[in-house]
Image (spheres, rainbow, N blue to C red):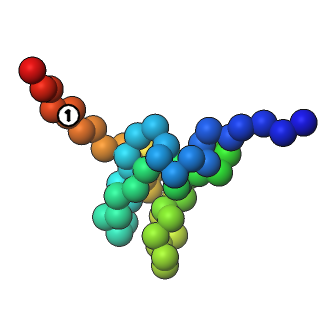
Amino acid sequence: MSGVNLHRETGGRDMLVCRKCGSEFPEGRATRDGWYYRCPADGCDSEGLGEGLRRIRRRRSRTR
């Protein structure tokens, strides 16, 4: 039985930033299973959501 792994989407849910190298990327690029997070940048070994990586809060612009 095959399932859909939503965390593997390149879009992901939120944007993340690496505290070590400063790279920004979608959450889906940093995890394969939704539990273990690692910076996808070449040569960077930062890992852990909240430790090595953090979520970026971006305001959505409203159009009227």
Q: Residue furthest right?
A: 1
Q: Position of residue 60 (x, y in %)?
A: 21, 32
**From the image, which quarter does the C terminus lie in?**
top left
Please say whether residue 4 is visible from this viewpoint: yes
Q: Residues within 10 Å of mark 1 (few under 14, many from 20)?
A: few
Residue 29, compared with residue 4, is above or below; it is below
Count of numbered badges drawn on the protein:
1
Identify the image quadrant of residue 14.
top left
Q: Please state which of residues 54 and 29 is positioned toward the viewer in this rendering.
A: 29
What kind of element bears circle 1?
A: loop
Q: Position of residue 11 (x, y in %)?
A: 47, 47
Q: Position of residue 18 (x, y in %)?
A: 38, 59
Residue 44, compared with residue 51, is above or below; it is below
**From the image, which quarter does the N terminus lie in?**
top right
Residue labelled with disc 1: 59
Residue occupying the point 39% across, 49% down: 16
From the viewer's perspective, is 14 left or right of 63? right
Please say whether residue 36 is visible from this viewpoint: no
From the viewer's perspective, is 45 left or right of 7? left
Q: Please state which of residues 59 and 61 is positioned toward the viewer in this rendering.
A: 61
From the viewer's perspective, is 64 left or right of 13? left
Residue 11, compared with residue 52, is above or below; it is above
Residue occupying the point 51% across, 70% down: 45
Q: Residue furthest front?
A: 64
Residue occupying the point 40% across, 56% down: 25
Q: Amino acid at mark 1?
A: Arg
From the viewer's perspective, is 7 left or right of 40? right
Residue occupying the point 71% across, 37% down: 4
Q: Please state which of residues 58 and 11 is positioned toward the viewer in this rendering.
A: 11
Q: Residue furthest top?
A: 64
Q: Residue furthest bottom?
A: 43
Q: Position of residue 20 (x, y in %)?
A: 37, 66
